[in-house]
Amino acid sequence: MNLPDHDSNNKSKRDFRIAIVGSGCTALKIATLITKYAKSAEAQGLNLKITLLESTHRVGGLLQTQRHLSGLKVEHAAQGVLASRTIFLETLEELGLTPEDLIAPPKERQLQTRFLINRSKNLVALRPSLLQLWKHGLLSPIAFLRILKDLLIGNELAPDPNETLYKFFERHFGHAVAENFILPFATGIWGGGAEQLLLRHAFPRLAELEIRYGSLLRGMLASALRGKQQKNQLTGDALKHAWPQGLLSFPNGMHTLIEQFSRVLQIDSRTASSAIQLKLTTPVQSIRKTEQGTLLLNDSLEFDTVFWTATPWSSPQLKWNQKDSQREWDSLQSTPTHGLIVVNLAGPRSPATRDGFGALAPRSSDGLLGVLFVHSIYPQHVPHNSYSYRALLAGDRNPEMILWDDAKLREYSLQELRTLKLIGENESPTHVDIVRWPRAIGIADRDHDARMRALWRIQAEHPNVHFAGIYKKGVGVADALQSGKDSFEEWLSGLRPSH
């Protein structure tokens, strides 16, 4: 879409109306970038006017932090963001934040220890001791040989471009590694799906390393070395600050990111004087292209451009006035998804309290996906001398759990922590916070490309509609921010004055 011609001597400006559907990280990133671009647009005769349309009663999407008077902070979704994601650090700098505004997990080895839960429901520390992993049945002698083979000789490249995450690691290191490590790992990110997720969607970098180095392990070692060198050079034009490493968060919780976005964008849901108009409890139920080429939302709100950041399956009722677009949209409703439940249990520390990073559950689990030890990761989020365990439930282990009532979820989670010996048999938490996320995470399986093509075909009929969000390339905060930046740049590339 081209900008209209303007006489450089004519100082009048035309309002260019932009709707952003959703108000999570992706939406706020887009709004921030458009706001920065506004001065350039003014020089071209356009006054950019942004409206955020949010279906719920609050801004932030999945990123919410519950703050108790006791000092306990409970994350409803992401616990933190890896510092290795440059888009996150760039965004922090755009928002005027500095390393002093962040917190990172303590570096003590004991507090960094990751655990796997074995079939006997014991915690097995993932330390560099192959003997211990063998002893607990997590690795076999054959797996050791496969690891050595990959390092020294390498493997043949996969003939199937649709190789799953599970099959990729099984091909390299055997069934034990895929089953005991990769499958639990996938539950910690996507709630499961290691046998459906395509490697090229989940971790495209791994496939690139295999091709380049002929060995996954050699490629990972080379990448780690290069990353360490780049970390020391990541200053100057790239980033203004030397940022800490690890899983970064904020002293007052991850919702701080949303609050900082809101401050920079001057979003205030309590007044009508905001620089950006915010419409809460306003689900978009229809999109109609007018004869003038604009877009009419809900048959009453007219815009020149619409950014859609909500997951398609969260709006099955959306109606398009073109049959082809409606058919493509309806096809997206069959996207495979996982529902997740976060149960945070907190109370006074006791001799039973365990320190470490967290634990991931095996296939045999009947509903538990993993546990994060928040009191070790971010002691700033927990009252003094207290524990805070964050249990993740449901996913593909037990999808029906999303329908359980709070009492049943509380009892299940409490029993799991007692069985794992994370709390004593007679201990009861003083705080239990439960959050349900139905159909929260989409699975990028072998049909994911077809779903992306469906979005492209909708855009072909509606060139001034742009799609962005965690349903496209990844499920983390950094993925949401990157998707927002990509969508903004796509839009900007079409905003070129006619000559």
Image (tube, rainbow, N blue to C red):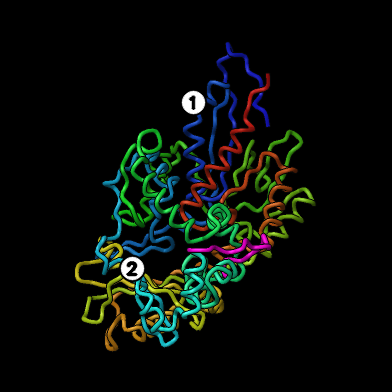
Q: Residue at x 38, y 75 (%)?
A: 130
Q: Quadrant of residue 408 in the image? A: bottom left
N-term mark: 2 or 1: 1
| Location of residue 209 in the rendering, given as x and y in whole percent from the top left corner | 53, 54
| Location of residue 229 in the rendering, given as x and y in whole percent from the top left corner | 37, 45
| Location of residue 138 in the rendering, given as x and y in whole percent from the top left corner | 44, 80
Q: Which residue is mark 2?
A: 357
Q: Is 376 contained in the magenta span?
A: no
Tell me which segment is drawn in magenta.
152-166
Q: CA distance from mark 2 to mark 1?
A: 45 Å
Q: Amino acid at mark 2?
A: Phe
Q: Residue at x 62, y 14 (%)?
A: 7
Left or right of residue 392: residue 15:
right
Q: Which residue is mark 1?
A: 39
From this view, report whether residue 82 is shown above or below residue 386. Answer: above
Which disc, if any, is residue 54? none
In the foreground, 479 or 166: 166
Left or right of residue 9: residue 316:
right
Q: Amino acid at mark 1?
A: Lys
Q: Secondary structure at mark 2?
A: loop
Mark 1 closeness class: few <14, some 14–19, many ≥20 residues within 10 Å: some
